[in-house]
Image (tube, grey):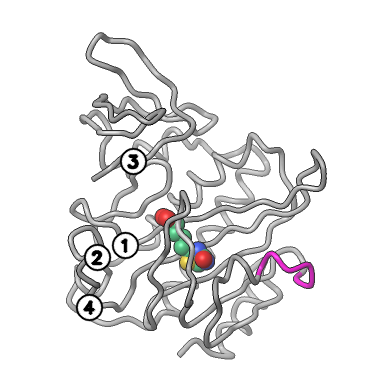
Amino acid sequence: MLSRETSDYLASKTLFKHCFIFNELDSTNNEAMKSTYPHYSLIIAEKQYAGKGRSGRKWVSDEGNLYFSIVLPPMPVEQLLPLNISTGYAICDALRNYADVSLKWPNDIVFNNKKLGGILIETKFSGNILEKIVLGIGINVNQLDFSHDIKEIATSLAIITERQYRTEEILWQILNNFEKNYTDLLKKRIDIIEKWCKYSMNFGKMIKIHLDGEKMELIEKGITDKGELIAVDHFGNERKIVLGDIYL
Ligand code: BTN
């Protein structure tokens, strides 16, 4: 389904001069970690048999959806969370051409409390030096049915809009948006706070979050320019959260 057309379009129009398309991989992130791929390579798979999600979870990766990873050159470590946020924004902005999707911190793409996309950033260090960043994106595009364990929490563009898509169409839009946001981020020309407020599903609302092994209820107030979530507890104390999972 993904074609030669994709590589040609990307090479002529975008940062992504090296595009590698596979029928099946364990995980596009694993593949992209191999040292053979130059910066800005794009690794795409039609399906994955060991797709990885955040926090060690698996990412169910049947055919018909989008699974890809981008190899990025090193950047200051403190820019990784903003990279996460701005990539989530880029995806959301592209998918909003089709459905009213939102963001859930730090980078889930959701519709009506169900998840249809996610981002997994992995890094390779040599000692203290960040050598390589792999940014993996998974979007449920055409899947109509999910296994019973994730049925209640997963959705797809096809389920939301009741039509099927050419995955290339979605991929190109995401990559164009990604490139714009990524180059703005490198030039420090992006306001992630404003972008977050535009698309966050929980802005100003109560969230339930796993923090330090505890489930807490907080009110989401926004994010900092470093990408940390700002939330307030019942006593009015403000917290800045770097790591945590909001559960739906
Ligand atoms: C999440 O848990 O929200 C992150 C999901 C990221 C899934 C994508 S699919 C392409 C890339 N390869 C992987 O193994 N994972 C990411």
SS category of the residue bearing label 1: strand
How packed is label 1: few (under 14 Cα within 10 Å), some, or many (20 or more)? many
Residue at 64%, 80% in the rendered image = 20
Amino acid type, callout 1: Leu
Residue at 39%, 18% in the rendered image = 239
Q: Give the mark nearer the N terminus: 3 vs 1.
A: 1
Would residue 118 be found to the left or right of residue 96 on screen? right
Magenta segment includes 55: no
How many angstroms separate mark 3 from mark 1 (CA)?
19 Å
Start and end of the magenta stretch? 32-37
Q: Which residue is mark 1?
A: 116
SS category of the residue bearing label 3: helix
Q: Which residue is mark 3?
A: 198
How many angstroms separate mark 1 from mark 4 (CA)?
12 Å
How packed is label 4: few (under 14 Cα within 10 Å), some, or many (20 or more)? some
**Circle 3 or circle 2, nearest the eye:** 2
How many angstroms separate mark 4 from mark 2 (CA)?
8 Å
Q: What predominant SS class does the magenta segment belong to?
A: loop
Image quadrant in which you'd find residue 199: top left
Give percent across and percent down for residue 49.
Answer: 47, 77
Q: Give the mark nearer the N terminus: 3 vs 2.
A: 2
Q: Which residue is mark 4?
A: 144
Residue at 70%, 76% in the rendered image = 18
Amino acid type, callout 4: Leu
Amino acid type, callout 2: Thr
Please name whichever residue, 86 or 121, is drawn nearer the observer in this view of the structure. Answer: 121
Residue at 48%, 44% in the rendered image = 85
Give percent across and percent down for residue 229.
Answer: 41, 30
Q: Give the mark nearer the N terminus: 1 vs 4.
A: 1
